[in-house]
Amino acid sequence: MTAHVEVMDLVAQMKAAEQAFVLATVVRTVSVTAAKAGAKAVLKAARDALADGEPRMVSVQPENLLAELGVKPGENRDGVRFAENMCPSKGTMDIFVEPVLPHPSLIVLGASPVAMSLAAQARQLGYHVTVAAPAADLPVSPDADMRIDGYQLGHLNEARRFIVVSTQGRGDEAALRAAVSIDAAYHAFVGSRRKMAALREKLVAEGIDAKALDRVKAPAGLDLGAITPEEIAMSILAEITVERRRGQRGEVPA
């Protein structure tokens, strides 16, 4: 019981810290088998689960049972990865490997109405939201998990990141400079192509990498005909959702 409580405490701590981890739970054993049986297979499954976010089952079995099933050690079948139990016990153990990933991270730079709406809507969709802007520019307290005074982003959590610059005339250059310095799956600028082109020219002249600036989507968001700050924020989140879910949805049967 004590060990179980300690594990649950550790799980709670890691979740609160927005850290990625894997829970491996023994769901079935047949005969006596050592806990180290199939450890390499479980570690491999854990790394794969962290990479793709999908749970999987590992079945550790003696050589004769694998032969009866017609599978080889390391083979995957119907979502189960099979491994050979090399221990003298020759028992069987099934382990469910479940990744626990941090919330995707949305970093909003700016204090514009679009920025405020974007933060609020993203929180409802389960994002870990960071709002970075000079405190004096903020009209209201943003709905965010983390607030940064200015554009010095510092340490950010290690989740998959999406960055949106929505300064709209107040600190555009400083915010863009900070945004492109951070590795992210998506960078976007709330503004016209012409404005982004002018900012790009300025920042490149200052020594900012042109390729990094070319990765910034401008204008941000899908073309939904959005007009209000809330609609523009929604269009940006729709575009982020497309990027976030890319490759995660299987083909839908006709």
Image: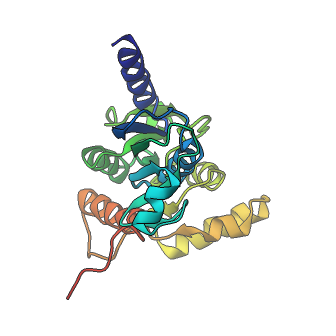
Q: Position of residue 112 (x, y in %)?
A: 38, 49
- Residue, x 41% and y 42% (percent of image)? 93
- Residue, x 33% and y 60% (percent of image)? 237
Quarter of the rendering occupied by the C terminus: bottom left
- Between 139 and 190, the one nearer to me in the picture: 190
- Residue, x 57% and y 51% (percent of image)? 44
Q: Is residue 58 above or below residue 222?
A: above
Residue 138 in view (yes/no)? no
Hey, which residue is sitting farthest left in the picture? 254
Does residue 26 appear to the left or right of 107 in the view shown? Answer: left
Q: Position of residue 12 (x, y in %)?
A: 38, 24
Q: Position of residue 196 (x, y in %)?
A: 56, 69
Q: Position of residue 32 (x, y in %)?
A: 42, 32
Which color scheme is applied? Answer: rainbow
Residue 77 in view (yes/no)? yes
- Between 159 and 226, the one nearer to me in the picture: 159
- Residue, x 62% and y 50% (percent of image)? 182
Does residue 157 appear to the left or right of 144 in the view shown? Answer: right
